[in-house]
Amino acid sequence: RGWANGLFSIEYTETSLFDVSFYYGVNNNYNVVSLNGCNSGERQVCDVEVDLSAYDGSEVDTYFTVTDNYQSVSSKVKTLDVDVTDPIFTKLEHSIDEDVVIFDILISEEVDIEYMDSADSGQRWKNLCRGKDFCNVIKRFKSGQHILRLRAVDDAGNFDEVILDPFVI
C-alpha cells in the first residue's frame, strides 16, 4: 500500500478528451474534483492537489476517471494511508573533528535524512540516515568550505529542510 499527502498525478492517452476527474473519500462516499487544463494526446500527465487534512492519520480511497465524448474509463481504486504532516527537526547538532562531521539529529517521525553539499560538483541528494526518527552518524568530508542542506522526508513525501551554517574542513 502507498501513502498520500494530497498531491496526485495521472498519466493517460486520450485523443478526444472531455474531462479528467479525481475521486477521494471513504466508504464509497467520494469527493469529486474535475481537473482543469488537462490536454488530449498520448501519454499526457495531469496533476491535482486536494486537502486531505480531514483524513490525516487514516486511510482514503482514490481513483481517476478519464472521459471522452463516448465513454468514461476509471482507474482502479487505491486505498492509501494519509500523512499531510511535515516532519520537523527537533534536535539538530553537529560537531567537526578534523575531516569528519558528527551529526546528532532528532526528527518528529520516522524519515529518510538526506544531505546536499555545496562543495560537491554533482549537487545531488545523498543518504545520511534511513527510516529512523534519529540520526547519530559520522561523515567524512574533503577539505574546503561546505554548506550542507539537510532534508528529512517521510513516506508520503512530506519534508523539512534546513541549511547548516558554513564550515571549513
Image (cartoon, rainbow, N blue to C red):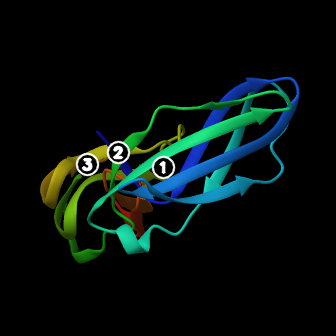
Which is more N-terminal, label 2 or label 3?
2
Q: Is residue 162 visible?
A: yes
Return the residue nearer the eye: 163 or 88: 88
Q: Is residue 147 above or below residue 20?
A: below
Q: Amino acid at mark 3?
A: Leu
Q: Amino acid at mark 1?
A: Ala
Question: What number is the disc on residue 119?
Answer: 1
Which is more N-terminal, label 3 or label 1?
1
Verify CB contact (< 8 Å) between mark 1 and mark 2. no
Closer mark to the observer between disc 1 and disc 3: 3
Closer mark to the observer between disc 3 and disc 2: 2
Q: Quadrant of the C terminus?
A: bottom left
Q: In this rendering, would 87 be left or right of 166?
A: left
Which residue does the image show at 40% across and 50% down from the upper left?
61
Which is more N-terminal, label 2 or label 1?
2
Which residue does the image show at 61% across and 58% down from the upper left?
32
Q: Quadrant of the N terminus?
A: top left
Residue 104, how many percent across, how many down?
A: 14, 67
Residue 31, how many percent across, how many down?
A: 55, 62
Image quarter of residue 41: top right
Question: What number is the disc on residue 147?
Answer: none
Task: Estimate the spatial distance between the alpha carbons at disc 3 and disc 2, rounded to whole Å.
Answer: 31 Å
Query: Judging from the image, what secondary structure is the residue with disc 3 in?
Result: strand
Return the residue nearer the eye: 124 or 25: 25
Query: Judging from the image, what secondary structure is the residue with disc 1 in?
Result: loop
Residue topped by disc 2: 79
Q: Amino acid at mark 2?
A: Thr
Question: What number is the disc on residue 128?
Answer: 3
